[in-house]
Image (spheres, rainbow, N blue to C red):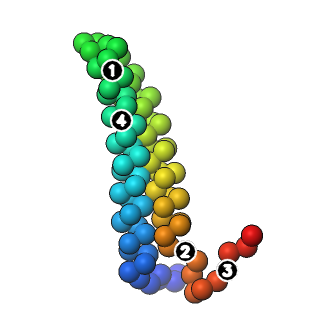
Amino acid sequence: MENPEITSRRLTATVLGLLSGAAGFGTLMLAGWLLYRRLWGDSPTALVVIVLLFGAAGLYAGWLLGVIVFSALRGSDNGEETPA
């Protein structure tokens, strides 16, 4: 099994991908919290539903955003061209 080299480019792409994914997750969780506070400020059942729905959507959106940022910043290996 090959041991991939950790370059500064890959490390930067990883860190920024993680940060953008966390920002995507946090944004959706904040939107869910604001919706909860506006509509059902005292219902624990509604809070659980909001956390589950917005949490699942936030995890997916954060993962997708992180992958896009990581892929865009990392680029191709060894100067290879990507197929069109």
Residue 6 seen in the current view? no
**Disc 4 to disc 1, C-alpha distance:** 10 Å
The residue tagged with tag 2: helix, strand or loop?
Answer: loop
Label disc, if present, on residue 8 of the rendered structure: none
Q: Quadrant of residue 19?
A: bottom left
Mark 1 burial class by Cα count in 10 Å: few <14, some 14-19, many 20+: many
| Residue 36's disc number | 1
Numbered mark located on residue 75 in the image: 2
Q: Are marks 2 and 4 in contact (CB under 8 Å)?
A: no
Instruction: Identify the amino acid type marked 1.
Output: Tyr
How far, Cα to Cα, is label 1 from label 3? 48 Å
Question: Disc count in the image?
Answer: 4
Picture coordinates of residue 32 (x, y %)? 37, 28
Closer to the N terminus: mark 1 or mark 3? Answer: 1
**In the image, farthest residue toward the left:** 42
Dot 4 corresponds to which residue?
29
Q: Amino acid at mark 2?
A: Gly
Where residue 10 appears, x then y in whole percent?
43, 75
Residue 9 in picture, x, y percent from top left: 43, 78
- Front in this rendered view, residue 36 or 48: 36
Q: Is residue 8 visible?
A: yes
Q: Name the residue: 32% across, 13% down.
A: 40
- Residue type at mark 4? Met
**Mark 2 touches mark 1? (CB < 8 Å):** no
Provide the residue designation for mark 3.
81
- Rate crowding at label 3 as few (under 14), some (14 to 19) or many (20 or more) other CA atoms within 10 Å: few
Task: Tell me whether circle 1 and circle 3 mark residues in contact (CB < 8 Å).
Answer: no
